[in-house]
Amino acid sequence: MLINEDIKIDYSDVLIRPKRSTMNSRGEVYLGRTHKFLWSKKKWTGIPIMSANMDTVGTPGMHKILSKNNMITCPAKHYLKKDVSKFKGGLENICWFGGIDDIKHLSKIKKGFIGLDVANGYTIRFVDAVKKLRDKCPEATIAAGNVVTADMTQELILAGADIVKVGIGPGSVCTTRIKTGIGYPQLSAVIECADAAHGLDAHIIADGGCTNSGDIVKAFAGGADFVMIGGILAGHDECDGEVENGVMKFYGMASESAMDRHGNHNNYRGAEGKTVEVPYRGKVDDTIKDILSGIRSACTYVGANRLKTLSKCTTFVRVHNTHNTIYED
């Protein structure tokens, strides 16, 4: 048994200190990023925000709106096996995720990104699956996760991943930390994994824990190349689900609701997610506008006229301790 006494932080543990800026308006901020990927050698340009690959938000309707904003949709896994054709247009802005047993289906995807998504990215079996997918799809841009430490980020990259998905337990409908005691404060995970990935010319996705646009800003400021959101997009017309008494259901992909829907019950696996009710929010356009406005505004506060330079302009200030500490990024 070891105890690591280094300070680790979540999004709620810090704020970003404002700095003098020469900018006149948030309209001057450019939110696009161009990423070139290590193994596929391909380039992608857009706003690097992704919908989570969850039943309720990874839908064709969500893709239709996100692709108009040059954002990425990660379809819910059940679409991969039988309903790929429901996602039309903007195919370069889709990231198809599957499990270890879905490599055959993933290898058939011709446009966009593909990825392997498991709750525990630390197993040898998972690393071998990443290698296998890379061998089958040498020109594909591949994402893989989830992990939360620098060493495993590097191992997945060396196994063939262009992008590593970072986050264990931070999501609003994930109960992994409660059920297992496993996890890592999300902002520290993002900072450490981004540093490891960038040293190899690879990229990361900050997956989970963002409850508002300010958290998305902190993820980008910490070095995330992409930010994946789920709960923020829940409750809209574009989601999968019915409106009842002014609310819609939103559930984790390891919840009883997900296992019931997809028949994933077995005698050794319990639920590590929950089902919640979120207020009905209408069309997702207004929420996206609010998110992007918040990011632009944050950039003006620190003098970053491009999203790319946000992390270089960031000073995090810890707020949940007795003596505030400043961390220069």
Image (cartoon, grey):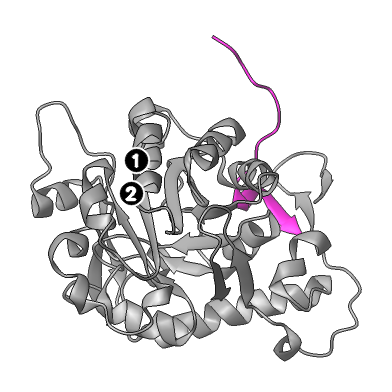
- Residue 160 in sight in this render: yes
Q: Specify the amino acid type for callout 1.
A: Lys
Report the disc number at residue 136. 2
Q: Which residue is mark 1?
A: 132
Compared with 62, 96 (above or below) is: above
Compared with 105, 270 (above or below) is: above
Bin the neighbour count of mark 2 within 10 Å (Cα to Cα): few under 14, some 14-19, many 20 and up: some
Q: Which residues are magenta?
A: 1-16
Taking the magenta stretch, the answer to whether it contains residue 329 is no
| x and y, in percent, of residue 162 in the image | 52, 52
Type of secondary structure dominating the magenta stretch: loop
User: Mark 2 and mark 1 in contact (Cβ < 8 Å)?
Assistant: yes
Say what secondary structure mark 1 lies in: helix
Q: Which residue is found at the position 49% from the left and 81% from the top?
A: 70
- Residue 281 in sight in this render: no
Q: Which residue is found at the position 23% from the left and 70% from the top?
A: 248
Q: Residue furthest top?
A: 1
Report the disc number at residue 164. none
Q: Specify the amino acid type for callout 2.
A: Lys
| x and y, in percent, of residue 138 in the image | 42, 53
Compared with 165, 92 (above or below) is: below
Taking the magenta stretch, the answer to whether it contains residue 2 is yes
Bin the neighbour count of mark 1 within 10 Å (Cα to Cα): few under 14, some 14-19, many 20 and up: some
Q: Nearer the viewer, residue 61 or 14?
A: 61
